[in-house]
Image (spheres, helix red, strand yellow):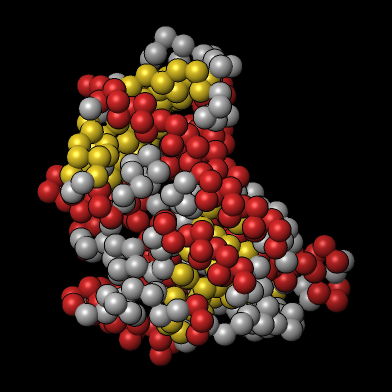
Amino acid sequence: AGSARTQLSSWGGWGVTSHGLPSSTTMRINVATASLVMVAMPSMGFLPTVRHQGARAQRRNLRMAAKCDVMVVGCGLPSRGMGWFHSLQMLNGECPSAELNHIVEPWFLGGGKEGPAGEEFAAFKEEWEPKGCAFHASLETVPPPTGPRMALIAGRTADNPKLLRDVIEAGCTKVMLEKPGATTVADLVDMSAYAKEKGVDVYMGYNKNIASYITKAREVEAKTEGAKTKLVTLNAYERDELEECFTRNSEGLLKNMAIHELALAATFYGMRASNVETVEVNKENSECLTLGGFTDFVKVEFTMTTTEGTSVTIFADRCGGAEAMAIVSDSTGKEVFTSTLPDEALKAEVEKKMDDFPDVMPYFWQQESDYRSLKERCAVMAVSNERGAPEGVATIEIAIAALELAEYLTPIMQKELM
């Protein structure tokens, strides 16, 4: 496990240069004192010092140079946890404006530290703690921030309402919340209200909102008369892994795997639980099972149409592979454009990484650049101390709309398929 992490750290193309940003700086900014830096950019020379620029340019350059103090809450198991992958990207320096200083992992540093999984997490801790990242079994041992701090919450969904309040009370000025944010709409609404009361912006880990394959598809859609779009998401679980998958993701497929697509439907197609007029389930391309006491979809394809006549189709398959697609059809139903994640240029690299690191969840590889970009945008906003959301980043309000759709759709489609 240790050697795999070392290889991950040194993988070609993983560094911050993949953003076109500098891989090193001559000096760093001290976030607590807001002291100035000069940044070396190979293609641009040095950024002018603040004293020669106006206030707006000063803020821009400070944001480019500063690093946001980041705390991950709920790291999870190395190679499989979303929090682990987020952590690794920041520890490897792939998000230039984010500096991961604290990882809070109650389970693997507490009741779950015994056994193979606990040992694997311990190896991860032993690798990175000497390099400056502190590990904590509880938020109580995390020192208070001395400047802007962003909490990235990636633990169990059911724990998120309390964790959100806890990190805000601990002084975090921004929160990045992994999808779906909470297990119920009511919880998410309460979380949103509390964050607003405290003046803290909450961003969601809906990386597909900023993914290039979605942007490309929407550009074609806008130029195609009578266009209809199908959003496809595929995971690579084996059939014999489904019971564990159903148990670990007990909130259900629509609130977990397909919540990204519901967020896209809410963001770009105006879908709301209150305006969906019809739901058509493609039974031939859907399957619903009860495993380990949990009833959920193995795969499901459905089309939603609003009262305004807007339609979008979503297909999610837990055992379909490691890919996402946006398929645009014209008014006759003919497919005119398909964009994929990963695209052809990235597919070979993703397949190589899957072969080299078979224990790592495949969908991490196909979306790694979007994960980087999402964290970077949020960290830049956190350092700026400005309110609002970065361009393209979903807010907790979009999360509420997506979760409302999931709660509305699940019983309807289960009734159709059971």
Quarter of the C terminus within the rendering:
top left
Q: What percent of the width, then of the height, locates residue 179?
A: 46, 51
Q: Is residue 247 visible?
A: yes
Residue at the image position 65 percent from the left and 53 percent from the top:
193
**Picture layout, residue 280 above or below residue 180:** above
Horizontal arrangement in the rendering, residue 390 relative to residue 297 (left or right): right
**Picture layout, residue 119 above or below residue 160:** below
User: Where on the picture, by quarter, is residue 110?
Assistant: bottom left
| Nearer-the-camera pick, 139 or 286 | 139
Q: What percent of the width, then of the height, locates residue 274?
A: 56, 27
| Nearer-the-camera pick, 274 or 228 | 274
State the count of labels: 0
Q: What percent of the width, then of the height, locates residue 386?
A: 74, 61
**Picture layout, residue 93 above or below residue 377:** below
Residue at the image position 25 percent from the left and 48 percent from the top:
246
Horizontal arrangement in the rendering, residue 364 relative to residue 383 (left or right): left
**Which residue, as the protein is rendered here, is positioned at the far bottom?**
130
| Nearer-the-camera pick, 226 or 122 | 122
Residue at the image position 79 percent from the left and 76 percent from the top:
49
Residue at the image position 58 percent from the left and 16 percent from the top:
308
Q: Is residue 215 visible?
A: no
